[in-house]
Amino acid sequence: MSTTKGWEKVKAAEAAKGINPIFDLVTSKPQGLLGEKSSKKLIDLSLGDPTLYGNFDLSPKVTEAVNQALESKKCNGYLPAAGKMEARKAVADRYSGGYCKLDYTDVFLTSGGCGAIDLAISVLANRGDNVLIPRPGFTMYKTAAMVRGVEHKMYNLLADRKWEVDLEQLESLIDSRTRAVLINNPSNPCGSNFSKEHLLDILALCEKYHIPVITDEIYHGMVFTGEVFYPLSTISESVPVLTVGGLAKQYLVPGWRVGWVTLHDPLKVFSPIKKGLSSLSDMLITVTSFIQKAIPAILDPSNVTEEFHADVRSRLEQHATICEQRLNSIPGLKAATKPQGSMYVMGLVDYSKFRPEVADYFSFFHALKHEENVSILPGDLFDFPDSFRFVITPPPELLNEAFDRIHAFCTRHLL
């Protein structure tokens, strides 16, 4: 007769302990919800997918490029692990500038931005090393470090200074096992954009301690009126930079999972890292072949023009303004700062103004979803309590309806 005896030694590997706090919250089962369950249609302000409601559509030139790649019948086979040379060269050409002079060997294609984050951390840090990541910050940074046995230390972003890095506190975290400082600009979840001066201050600190930078620039160039985006590699004269990028947000195709890591090595000290990126790429899933064939046409600015990108930025800014104004009109909530870019607005919540049944992030999230069918993510998931992240991409009429519901909910639960 079969028995379970002896099978207790079979355990999940350490890598399987990685968590996705967003998924954990969304799938959690709350107890004792008091209000009446809403029959209204869900308005999702939690998922950072600009395509969700159909109001942000990709350029027809992108569709055309992919169709031509498929119809060519020349991209159905395997490709080099780091990516097709022509695709890598297109990325190198598109994102070179200033001090950053890339060639195709400096580009490594990955399965989306998250794949790029994993690759960048993996190539720089061993078990027991540490990387410095932002608070608040994208959840994947912490998860990618944890599954590799890499410690993550969190440096603070200061809301009252437009989410700039607390450089003094960041410096206090550096030790002999620090292998990288990771920044995200423009920011998810903060909706912020660093000035050139602040980026140079970060680089100066990293140069002082000879620590490379991983910069997540998946929202490359997506900033609002009065803001200027500076790719970190273009202003780094000496500090090595691994840049995480991709098509997902700029080109409105997150489901295609097209990401990359680029290597900026101004002093030519990163040869082992370049070799490591190549070796790791051999073990990872990369971008599908027909998308790779289309990448040169997609990144050609004569196809997907600056006018297209400017229109997307303008509409996002209009949406961000709606969110900021509506947040500041709701009792117990307010916008953390004026949004500067990306696809998010951070709102602060004063739980002391609400009744006990919604006076913590878990209860507030589930009660709002239950009573008004609006989904927003608590800042606790980004290690920033007493806040929520609002995705700004739904159409204006849906944003206004969502904030009407949130206003009703907050009014109903005020002390």
Image (spheres, helix red, strand yellow):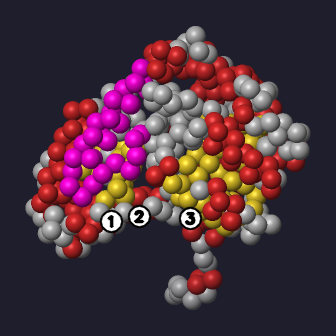
Instruction: Tell me if I can see residue 91 in this picture.
Output: no
- Return the residue at label 2: 385
- Check residue 403 for magenta coloring: no
State the residue at coordinates (36%, 63%).
386
Which label is found at residue 18?
A: 3
| Residue at x-position 58% and y-position 84% | 8
Instruction: Identify residue type, mark 2.
Output: Pro
Span highlighted in magenta in the image: 311-339
The residue drawn where x is 48% and y is 28% is 226
Sequence-earlier tag: 2 or 3:
3
Secondary element under disc 3, as helix, strand or loop, is loop
Q: Are marks 1 and 2 in contact (CB under 8 Å)?
A: yes
Q: Which residue is mark 1?
A: 361
Give amino acid for label 3.
Gly
Label 2, label 3: how far apart the Cα atoms are: 21 Å
Q: Is residue 413 left or right of residue 348?
A: left
* Residue 116 x, y percent position in the rendering: 64, 44
